[in-house]
Amino acid sequence: YPVYEKELLLKYTMKKSVLVGIFLIMILAPLKAQHVSASTNVLGWADYGTVNLSAGVSLARHFSFEAGGRYNPFSYQRQSGLTVRNQQKTAFAGVRYWPWYVFSGWWVGAKGQWSEYSRTGIWRYAVEEGTGYGIGLSTGYTWMISKRFNLDFGIGGWGGRLYDHTLYHCLKCMEIRESGPKNFIALDDVSISLMIMF
């Protein structure tokens, strides 16, 4: 029980930290910001209709803060009877470094992220569910189309700890194949985003 209580406390502490970070960035950062941006990942919408939005603010020539989230409640039934989905509630907050100038050119980023998920594979019946906390690293390039519009390309990964993690053989039988907390590293944030500047 002491180990379980310690992991439960860590879980809620990390979740609160991410949410507080997002709140502070979105409320306080614009007060000193030179530029503000809003963006959405086109590839995210193509991923079973995942709704996604992020906001960024620049606090210096080479640094910007970013916060946002992804949400997907959808589930699809294929003709073969296989159910596919990438359901999730994800929130993140982080910082980007821009070698040339904020919101233009190459960038590297770091973030903290929380995600609650339930997903299946395209060709498999197995269902994976759980809650994850961790940090991520990413890199990309932002192309300035005009004064108000950018096209942002990025790729990254994240790693951390999965809590309440369960892997089932299939959605109908719900036979547990794997269960319990575990560490992970995964690909994340493959993006082609439309960015609007304010």
Image (cartoon, rainbow, N blue to C red):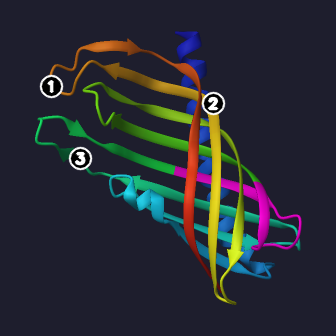
Quadrant of the rendered image containing residue 120:
top left
Residue sitting nearer the eye, 11 or 125? 125
170 inside magenta stretch: no
Q: Amino acid at mark 2?
A: Gly
Q: Are marks 3 and 1 in contact (CB under 8 Å)?
A: no
Residue 23 image offset from top left, x and y in percent: 62, 62
Q: CA distance from mark 3 to mark 2?
A: 26 Å
Sequence-first disc among 3 and 2: 3
Residue range (magenta): 91-108
Q: Which dot marks residue 134?
A: none
Q: Identify the residue under disc 2.
A: 160
Q: Amino acid at mark 1?
A: Lys
Label 3 secondary element: loop
Q: Identify the residue under disc 1.
A: 172
Residue sitting nearer the eye, 112 or 83? 83
Q: Identify the residue under disc 3.
A: 75
Q: CA distance from mark 3 to mark 1?
A: 14 Å
Q: Residue visible at 37% across and 30% down? A: 129
Residues packed near mark 2 inside 10 Å, few (<14), some (14 to 19) or many (20 plus): some
